[in-house]
Amino acid sequence: IAVVVSDAGLTTDVSAEELVGLLSGRVGNWSVLGGAARPVLPVIPLPEDDLRLLIDEQLMRGTPYASGARLAAEPEQALALLTEGPGAVALVPLSAAPENSTPLRLDGALPSTSGEYGLMAQVLAIGPSEPEGAVRDWLVWIQASQEP
């Protein structure tokens, strides 16, 4: 999962606690975190979205989101909402983060598959039988790339 912002002048590193503050509305301006004086606009996935459930479980842990948070049905919509105003912050799958963007560091770590980042999702592949051909090759590759 990547934490992306609308512009580079906001901040480059947040703690998990600060991110909860940004998403919940307890931190309403980026200047509180040493960034530009811009109001925070959280962009969050819809309730029941797998990404939202993961964020709720790993990060928010019962803390409600800001009442002014914008809802996004999919990562592309979240990224589009980032352009609507300076100060927006969104959580998207790392694979959806734009190539020219630099996600925020979370507790000093950039998002990666290394396991050092505070927000990660596991993917489980289930099938009716042992996969064959290209599907099996892909699953073997993806499992190998996740090992430390």
Image (cartoon, helix red, strand yellow):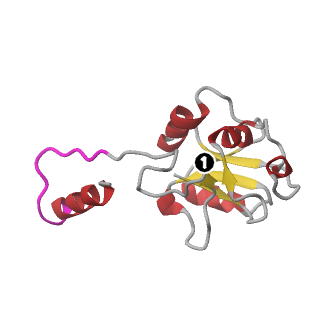
Q: Nearer the viewer, residue 115 or 50?
A: 115
Is disc 1 placed on a helix, strand or loop? loop
What residue is drawn where x is 79% and y is 49%?
A: 33
- Looking at the image, the residue that sits furthest to the right is 37
Callout 1 crowding tier (Cα within 10 Å): few <14, some 14–19, many ≥20? some
Q: Is residue 138 above or below residue 44?
A: below
Left or right of 138, for residue 73: right
- Looking at the image, the residue that sits furthest to the bottom is 100
What amino acid is found at the position of numbered circle 1 in the picture?
Answer: Asp
Q: Is residue 125 above or below residue 82?
A: above
Residue 6, position as x, y percentages in the image: 72, 61
Task: For residue 48, say whether it is visible.
Answer: no
Q: Nearer the viewer, residue 61 or 146?
A: 146
Residues rendered magenta in the picture:
124-135
Residue 60, position as x, y percentages in the image: 61, 33
Residue 95 falls inside the magenta stretch: no
Query: Which quadrant of the view contains residue 69?
Result: top right
Query: Which quadrant of the view contains residue 2?
Result: bottom right
The residue that disc 1 covers is: 107
What residue is drawn where x is 52% and y is 36%?
A: 58
Q: Is residue 92 above or below residue 122?
A: below
What residue is drawn where x is 50% and y is 50%?
A: 117
| The C terminus: image quadrant | bottom left
Residue 55, position as x, y percentages in the image: 55, 39
Left or right of 63, for residue 118: left
Task: For residue 123, say whether it is visible.
Answer: yes
Residue 147, position as x, y percentages in the image: 29, 54
Q: Is residue 140 above or below residue 33?
A: below
* SS assignment for the magenta stretch, majority: loop
What residue is drawn where x is 74% and y is 58%?
A: 11
